[in-house]
Image (cartoon, helix red, strand yellow):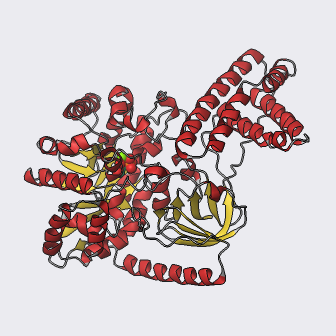
């Protein structure tokens, strides 16, 4: 469902429904709550050093400025002029003397701390705006408060603010960052609807791993929905019904029931291997982002972890986790797997995963810039710390290492050299490391896919990251709903690259898996198996169904038919052909 899109002949939506991009399957029927973050407590203590408090305030302003500039760039790309104008207004407030002068006075004359001085000023100014006659000026109060809250967050070092829920609800937000999504409480969130974003953005991947139905790219209109509005959403199709009538509610209640029953059936058999009618086995693995998810994945039927996204250990904090903290996290994950293999991917920073303390510079095209292995090869201390932590756990458990976003053989060689150094450092200190650790690369960049034969001589395995491979091959950013239609992993170019990688791996006796979202798409699984993929790695909730599908296949048949699909010309033809595979 993750990669499923509404067919282009989808009936024109009724006036009370919205069509978004499907993100995470499932039906939710419930009331809405807009993303209204709960503010952190403002400290009350006075300051003894007004000058340093003022400097802290100015640096908070600068951090807020860079955040707003990022938001402005996103808004300019994805939304209408109003949203961009709002961020431009926010930028002006940062330099507004009507806010700065009173803050300065409170810090120096009243010895207030920066956060308290700033927030008192914000409240005072917002209240003045609220009492004005003019409608337009009155609405500026909200802007002042938004800017105020943003600066407050930077002053207090709070990376993400999340709303608290007192009853289950469907969350509505412009877009969620990975850090915000991580903090959401799945017990209260029935569904997630965002105005922007796409199916393979990291917040979307999180929604899937949490098993929360979600749709993205619903546009500005979804943000106008008031709190406590009853609605129905279907994450499999991306459709949202505002003000649903009895008929829709009844239909979707039944659909939800049927889907639950099918999922329960698949779960019953989820511990059995995935073997086709004619005896071909495919490994079904889990993608995890925290150590505690490993045990849950095993519960869902995972035979291994094909992708541990370690960056989540690094997000949303002031400094990197040290070697001991990382060692413990990786060990907890490994222990949760009961001797099943664990592939740990080294830090994938950059792109849409912003890690404040790495001081990554602002870039016009972060996905084409300083990201993943490129960052690790520059921050060698950070990288080797991670490698040492992994190696120490690998002395006790079956661990493999995987490098993200490898583009050139030189990068692979540099990463290997640093891995050797990390091994020596441990041994010099009398620590234990494995005699040999299997090491592979992610295939996410077309250059690496095209050079797969050369890489296959040296690596132990490939894991194809179709999320990035699709955006880079089709030059269509993964989080951008404007190009969501184009950024489609079913394009024949992607299939040809996948096929090329599998052939290169098998020629050298290596294996190739997929850990992008395509791996869990029920419509794609038969084709991927037919192309010879050895392993499919996905969010845990998708595993039971994936195994069920593989068990219904005939390998010799889908191999032949898979070859024929490779020759098709368009995404639409491929999707149509996939529908006939099982
Ligand atoms: C991918 O790009 O397909 C992938 C699995 O990595 P991530 O989604 O974390 O970028
Ligand atoms: Mg990737």
In front of the other: 238 or 305: 238
Question: Which quarter of the figure has residue 426?
Answer: top left
- Return the x and y of residue 69 as percentages of the image width and height: 58, 32
Give the side of residue 553 with respect to residue 287, left or right.
left
Residue visible at 20% across and 75% down?
Answer: 276
The image shows residue 116, relative to residue 306, as above or below, that is above
Q: How many marks?
A: 0
- Return the x and y of residue 117 as percentages of the image width and height: 81, 28
Question: Which quarter of the figure has residue 524?
Answer: bottom left
Give the side of residue 480 with respect to residue 566, left or right.
right
Q: In the rendered image, which quarter contains the C terminus? A: bottom left
The image shows residue 45, relative to residue 449, as above or below, that is above
The image shows residue 451, relative to residue 6, as above or below, that is above
Give the side of residue 120 with respect to residue 95, left or right.
right
Which residue extends farthest left?
Answer: 507
In front of the other: 234 or 356: 234
- Return the x and y of residue 162 as percentages of the image width and height: 64, 50
Instruction: Answer whether residue 286 is visible to the viewer in this image.
Output: no
- Return the x and y of residue 102 as percentages of the image width and height: 84, 24
Instruction: Answer whether residue 512 is visible to the viewer in this image.
Output: yes
Q: In the rendered image, which quarter contains the N terminus? A: bottom left
In front of the other: 283 or 443: 443
In front of the other: 460 or 558: 558
């Amino acid at each position: 469902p993750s990669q499923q899109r509404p067919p282009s002949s989808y009936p024109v939506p009724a006036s009370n429904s919205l069509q978004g991009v499907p993100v995470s399957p499932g039906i939710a029927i419930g009331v809405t709550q807009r993303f209204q973050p709960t503010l952190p407590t403002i400290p009350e203590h006075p300051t003894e050093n007004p000058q340093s408090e003022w400097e802290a305030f100015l640096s908070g302003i600068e951090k807020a400025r860079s955040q707003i500039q990022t938001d402005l760039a996103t808004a300019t790309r994805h939304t209408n002029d109003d949203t961009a104008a709002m961020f431009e207004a926010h930028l002006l407030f940062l330099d507004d003397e009507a806010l700065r002068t009173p803050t300065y006075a409170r810090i120096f004359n009243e010895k207030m701390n920066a956060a308290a001085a700033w927030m008192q000023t914000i409240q005072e100014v917002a209240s003045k705006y609220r009492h004005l006659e003019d409608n337009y000026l009155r609405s500026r109060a909200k802007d002042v408060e938004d800017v105020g809250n943003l600066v407050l967050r930077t002053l207090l070092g709070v990376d993400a603010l999340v709303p608290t829920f007192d009853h289950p609800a469907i969350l509505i937000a412009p877009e969620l960052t990975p850090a915000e999504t991580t903090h959401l409480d799945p017990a209260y969130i029935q569904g997630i609807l965002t105005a922007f974003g796409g199916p393979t953005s990291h917040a979307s991947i999180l929604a899937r791993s949490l098993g929360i139905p979600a749709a993205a790219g619903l546009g500005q209109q979804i943000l106008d929905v008031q709190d406590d509005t009853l609605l129905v959403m279907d994450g499999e199709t991306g459709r949202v019904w505002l003000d649903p009538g009895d008929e829709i509610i009844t239909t979707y209640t039944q659909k939800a029931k049927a889907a639950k029953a099918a999922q329960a059936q698949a779960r019953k058999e989820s511990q059995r291997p995935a073997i086709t009618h004619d005896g071909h086995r495919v490994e079904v693995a889990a993608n995890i982002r925290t150590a505690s998810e490993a045990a849950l994945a095993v519960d869902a039927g995972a035979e291994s972890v094909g992708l541990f996204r370690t960056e989540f250990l690094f997000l949303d904090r002031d400094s990197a986790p040290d070697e001991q903290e990382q060692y413990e996290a990786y060990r907890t994950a490994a222990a949760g797997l009961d001797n099943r293999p664990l592939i740990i991917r080294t830090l994938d920073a950059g792109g849409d995963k912003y890690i404040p303390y790495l001081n990554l510079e602002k870039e016009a095209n972060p996905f084409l810039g300083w990201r993943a292995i490129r960052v690790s090869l520059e921050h060698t201390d950070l990288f080797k710390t991670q490698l040492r932590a992994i190696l120490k756990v690998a002395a006790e458990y079956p661990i493999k290492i995987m490098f993200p976003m490898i583009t050139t053989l030189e990068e692979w060689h540099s990463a290997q050299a640093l891995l050797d150094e990390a091994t020596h450092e441990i041994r010099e200190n009398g620590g234990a490391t494995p005699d040999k650790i299997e090491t592979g690369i992610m295939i996410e960049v077309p250059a690496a896919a095209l050079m797969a034969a050369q890489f296959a001589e040296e690596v132990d395995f490939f894991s194809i990251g179709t999320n990035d491979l699709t955006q880079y091959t089709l030059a269509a950013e993964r989080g951008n709903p404007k190009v969501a239609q184009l950024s489609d992993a079913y394009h024949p170019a992607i299939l040809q690259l996948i096929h090329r990688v599998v052939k290169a791996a098998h020629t050298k006796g290596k294996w190739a898996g997929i850990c992008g979202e395509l791996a869990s798409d029920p419509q794609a699984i038969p084709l991927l198996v037919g192309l010879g993929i050895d392993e499919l790695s996905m969010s845990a909730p998708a595993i039971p169904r994936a195994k069920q599908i593989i068990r219904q296949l005939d390998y010799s048949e889908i191999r032949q038919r898979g070859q024929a699909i490779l020759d098709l010309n368009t995404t639409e033809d491929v999707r149509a052909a996939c529908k006939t595979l099982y």
